[in-house]
Amino acid sequence: MARDLDPSCKKCRRERQKLFLKGERCETDKCAIERRPYPSGEHGRGRVKETEYLLQLREKQRAKRIYGILEKQFRNYYELAARQKGITGENLLRLLEVRLDNVVYRGGLAASRKQARQLVRHGHVLVNGRKVDIPSQRLKEGDVVEIKPSSRDSAVVLNAVKLAEGRPVVRWLKSDLDARRITVLAMPTREDIDVPVKESLIVELYSK
């Protein structure tokens, strides 16, 4: 399975903003963007001519990094979104939001999407009572996601639940943190998706 092994903090610095890729660390003054809010490398603080293509590319890269997926998989999501009814950009973000690893993170059972992906891959997550180890599985309305009983009091889950108490409520999910359970109430609308991405620029990039 292909994985993105690039350092998380360098990704945030490249985008010049917090992408919250490392959970609790992103909330402290240890966050790299707090100390060095510019791209790494000797040319990190140099001037860059912001062309139309560059702006479009940066939006695509930002979305990929936020959700932790690679180029081929991202393009597949775009092509699927383009075939669906409705606005392509919104369809794309919706497909990314209903991934199992994202729902585990959004629901407060993991401190980051990367950690959520690891929980799923290691078999700690149940969907409708059955173990699922595919982070990209798309969920639908009515699905119930929970941490398996033997893992509910692990240090990783306990820490994630503690961090989740200060997060905004996700309207399209119902989280029962005590029971380590998340229910998908509905498919998310664009208003429900608070990622700092201008999806229209991604559509323009792929439409060329």
Image (cartoon, helix red, strand yellow):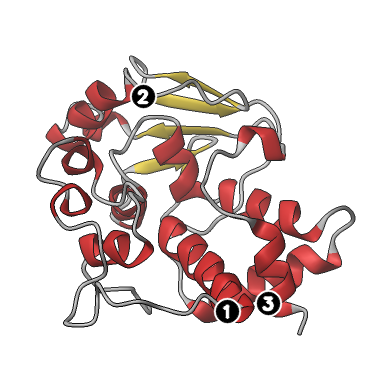
Residue found at x 45% / y 67%: 69
| Residue 50 in view here | yes
Circle 3 residue: 205
Circle 2 residue: 180
Which label lies toward us, 2 or 1? 1
Q: Upstream in the sequence, badge 3 or badge 2?
A: 2
Residue 42 position, x and y percent, is 16, 82
Tell me which amino acid carries mark 2: Arg
Q: Distance between the residues labelled 3 and 1?
A: 12 Å
- Residue 185 appears in which quarter of the rendering? top right
Residue found at x 65% / y 68%: 202
User: In the visual, does 164 lie left or right of 59?
Assistant: left
On screen, residue 147 above or below 25: above
Kindly state the secondary structure of the residue where label 1 is placed. loop
Q: Are marks 2 and 1 in contact (CB under 8 Å)?
A: no
Kindly state the secondary structure of the residue where label 2 is placed. loop
Q: Distance between the residues labelled 3 and 2?
A: 40 Å
Residue 18 position, x and y percent, is 33, 49
Residue 60 position, x and y percent, is 55, 69
Tell me which amino acid carries mark 1: Thr
Circle 1 residue: 51
